[in-house]
Amino acid sequence: MPISDTTRDQLQELVARYPRPRSALMPMLHLVQSLEGEVTSEGIAACAEAAGVSAAEATAVASFYTMYKRKPVGKHHIGVCTNTMCGLLGGDEVYAAVSERLGVGHDEPTADGEFWLERIECQAACTHAPVMTVDWEYMDDVTPTSAVDVIDRLARGEEVRSTRGPVIRDFRASEHSLAFPEDGLAAEGTPVDEKMLVGLRLARELGMAAPDAPVAGTTNDAGQEG
Ligand code: FES
């Protein structure tokens, strides 16, 4: 699909936010990914032109980061974390159950274009492991049963909310928010809860604090240069 003048204007809007145009490449790639649910060749060319880099350089960025897809993701992106903490607490079982429900494996779309499954890396949400994401919204403390239930409800077209509050929209809407987070949706819900703050509370109760960071040009107790 050709890139519209509106999208080209939005790319320029992103470029204007950074000291150097090429620094805007990542949000620009999210923006073009929001158009068709994948980063197309036309999208890469438009990003490269706006950033003042070659198409090969823009392609290098798009192919390095796994969040950029070169095939249509479909309506919903499902991520299941199987890194250390989630894996220890059942992430592999969640992944197996979701994979069986959808009938696809890692980085594959379902035939009806409704879902894309990805085995994802740590989402910095280990407090609530095992974690699943739907269009990059958190589903905390999932089990194989609750994860499959989320898929079933999405498939029936029912309203589904992240365990942190926001209503699940779709992959393309989330991609647009990653390009333009000021749409307000990124701040919806409750990003921090009591469980996440237990360590901080205990540290304060015990009078614990992080050691001072070494000053540049000095050495710390271990003899490492700052
Ligand atoms: S290991 Fe899964 S969120 Fe950190």
Image (cartoon, rainbow, N blue to C red):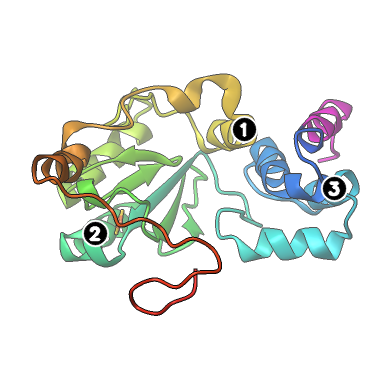
Quickly name the residue at label 2.
86
Closer to us: 50 or 4:
50
Question: Would you say the beta carbon of the disc 2 residue lies within 8 angstroms of ligand 1?
Answer: yes
- Say which amino acid is labelled 2: Cys
Neighbor class of circle 1 (other Cα within 10 Å; few <14, some 14-19, many 20+) is many
| Magenta segment, prevailing SS (helix, strand or loop) | helix
**Mark on residue 176?**
1
Q: Quadrant of ligand 1?
A: bottom left
Residue for point 27% across, 49% down? 131
The amino acid pointed to by label 3 is: Ala
Rendering quarter of residue 153: top left
Query: Depth check: 191 or 1 in front?
Result: 191
Residue under label 3, please give it. Answer: 51
Residue displayed at 83% across by 45% down: 21
From the viewer's perspective, is the residue at label 3 or at label 1 nearer? 3
Query: Where residue 207 sits: x, y (%)?
Result: 13, 45
Inter-mark Cα distance, 3 to 2:
38 Å
**Which circle's residue, 3 or 1, is located before the other in the chain?**
3
| Residue 186 vertical position relative to residue 28 in the rendered view, above or below | above
Q: Identify the mark nearer the N-term, 3 or 2.
A: 3
Give the magenta-colored segment's residue range.
1-13
Q: Residue furthest bottom?
A: 223
